[in-house]
Image (cartoon, helix red, strand yellow):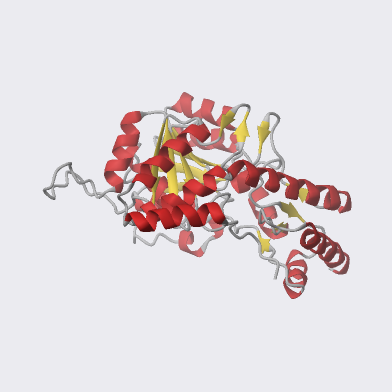
Amino acid sequence: MIPLCTPDLGPAERALLLEALDSTFVSSVGPFVERFEREFADFTGARQAVACASGTAALHLALRVCGVGRGDLVLVSDFTFIASATPILHQGAEPVFIDSEERTWNLDPQAVEDAFVRLDRSGHRPKAVIAVHVLGAPADFGPIQAICDRFGAVLIEDAAEALGATIGTAHVGTLGRIGCFSFNGNKVITTGGGGMCVTGDPALATAMKHLSTQAKLPGLAFVHDQVGYNYRLTNLAAALGLAQLGRLPEFLRRKHAIAERYRAALEPLGCRFQGVHDGARSSDWLASCLVAGDRDRILAQLTAAGIGGRPLWMPLSDQPCFLEDSRGGDGGKFGEERRFMRFGGEVAKRLSATGISLPSSTHLSVADQDHVITTLIHAMGQS
């Protein structure tokens, strides 16, 4: 089996994990956690970094410290993994789904503006926007930031898949109020499970760290001034992350080379790959394209050949858990359809219907990639 994307682990990871084990600091206290935060901040150019248990936890912390709460509206990509939106519900707020632009598959700035204008006129101005850098490609950040500034909304970056992606000389995650990353097993780097928040505001970093450790006040007594969470990253996970971070430039070079090889072979045959805006560079987390032919039949042929392709996401607005309001209310402020609002066209639906992610492990061999390409070409011809 050629898997979709598996972690690349070696002697550096083993050495630091053994060092963490030998220290006996294996939980959320230990030197590797703060060291990982410092070196991650240095790599991305962020002022502050706060390590936490997952990318979903990172988004939850970001929303909470930015003041998003019950009844607030938060704009988020319709075309993304569900974890981009569920923290909005955890805060008692409501997601407003925004369609994608054709080129990068990220938030459509025009749909973002349309949503703000309409909602503001109705007296329900959105509190925040979560801009997802989908599959590692940077969103069209400038126009989205300008819209948020115009309406006084907070801009949070979901950079879970985009570590190492840049807009000009700036790393994604460092451009909004808070940037959130994931270190799940299939991400650009992994800690097994974990995440990171980065911000230029030390007060927000302090607040997120406090909440991530059950909001316990300093001292021996167990005194908690807020309802917090058990969201702090463990020392063991941080040791693994630190070793992975040292190899990140190598990983990014491999990701870029794999994606370019797919493009060179498959674009002439009608596959349309995710694009990037001028001056931006993707992390190329998962090389993904829209295929010519019956997508599901093509995927079935890849699977039969031992290749771990994957369909692109179903739009969140079509997810069963978002079709009706599980909280038992009227489905939100607008209408009686018991659905969350959506703005834009049908790009997300087309991406979902025709899109495939291709094997993109950093240790993918040329021979295995050739097998993927050859099989996909054959499958498209047969579909």
In this rendering, does residue 382 appear at all? yes
Question: Residue 257, percent across and down?
Answer: 74, 46
Q: Is residue 340 left or right of residue 229?
A: right
User: How many labels were placed on the picture?
Assistant: 0
Question: Residue 174, percent across and down?
Answer: 49, 32
The answer to whether 148 is drawn above or below residue 62 in the figure is above
Name the residue nearer the viewer: 17 or 253: 17
Name the residue nearer the viewer: 257 or 11: 11
Answer with the quarter of the image where residue 9 lies: bottom right
In this rendering, does residue 99 appear at all? no
Screen quadrant of the N terminus: bottom right
The answer to whether 340 is drawn above or below residue 150 in the figure is below
Q: Is residue 104 left or right of residue 34?
A: right
From this viewpoint, which residue is outermost toward the bottom? 304
The answer to whether 328 is drawn above or below residue 111 in the figure is below
Q: Is residue 366 left or right of residue 53?
A: right
Screen quadrant of the C terminus: bottom right
Question: Residue 323, percent across and down?
Answer: 48, 60
The residue that appears at 50% across and 51% down in the rendered structure is 183
